[in-house]
Image (tube, rainbow, N blue to C red):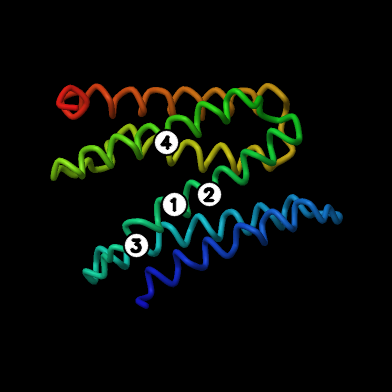
Amino acid sequence: MNLPNKLTLSRIVLIPVFMAVLYWGFPGASYVALAIFIIASLTDLLDGKIARKYHLVTDFGKFADPLADKMLVTAAMLWFVENGQMPAWALLIVICREFAVSGLRMIAADKGRVIAAGWSGKVKTAATMVCVVVMFLPIPAALNTLCVWVITLTTLYSGVEYFVKNKDVIASM
């Protein structure tokens, strides 16, 4: 197994550790969880750079890397919902968008077409990661609400963009 794949696996392994720290609830647990989230997020940047630079892109990486990202972010957002920092409807929008875009990509792949990540999807990912980090800090409720809206609106926009740009895939069903 190459280094990028090992980094992806380490990110997946860190998810239950991240959640266990949060549920353990010792003093400072949210800061330890935040550190774990940041480390896991950085492994995502690192594995991608290494895989592209050294041509180590694998089918495992193509599958597991985006899955690990979605699992990590969903875990954090589930915690925020449970804590009352994020309404469940906002998390539902995030999850539905991920299922819908993944389904669109599967249909496109079945037709021999690859739908690459678009600019808005990259903005959505970056904005979400930054907002999740901010939401772990002691911030005013208004800033927390702003983060929820940034996550929700960038998620909606990027999801709609995927479908608009690839409407031919749907039309050919």
Gap between marks 3 and 1, in whole Å?
Answer: 9 Å
Q: Is residue 158 left or right of residue 69?
A: left
Q: The disc labelled 2 sits on which kind of residue? A: Met
Are circles 2 and 1 on residues that touch, CB within 8 Å?
yes
Q: The disc labelled 3 sits on which kind of residue? A: Gly
Gap between marks 3 and 2, in whole Å?
Answer: 15 Å
Q: The disc labelled 4 sits on which kind of residue? A: Phe
Question: What residue is shown with label 1?
Answer: 67
For label 3, the SS is helix
Question: What residue is shown with label 2?
Answer: 71
Quarter holding the N terminus is bottom left
For label 4, the SS is helix
Residue found 82% across the figure and 56% down from its top:
24
Gap between marks 2 and 1, in whole Å?
Answer: 6 Å
Question: What residue is shown with label 4?
Answer: 99
- Nearer to the camera, 173 or 43: 173
Label whose residue precedes the other's in the sequence (4 or 1): 1
Question: What residue is shown with label 3?
Answer: 61
Q: Position of residue 115 (x, y in %)?
A: 22, 40
Residue found 74% across the figure and 38% down from its top:
138
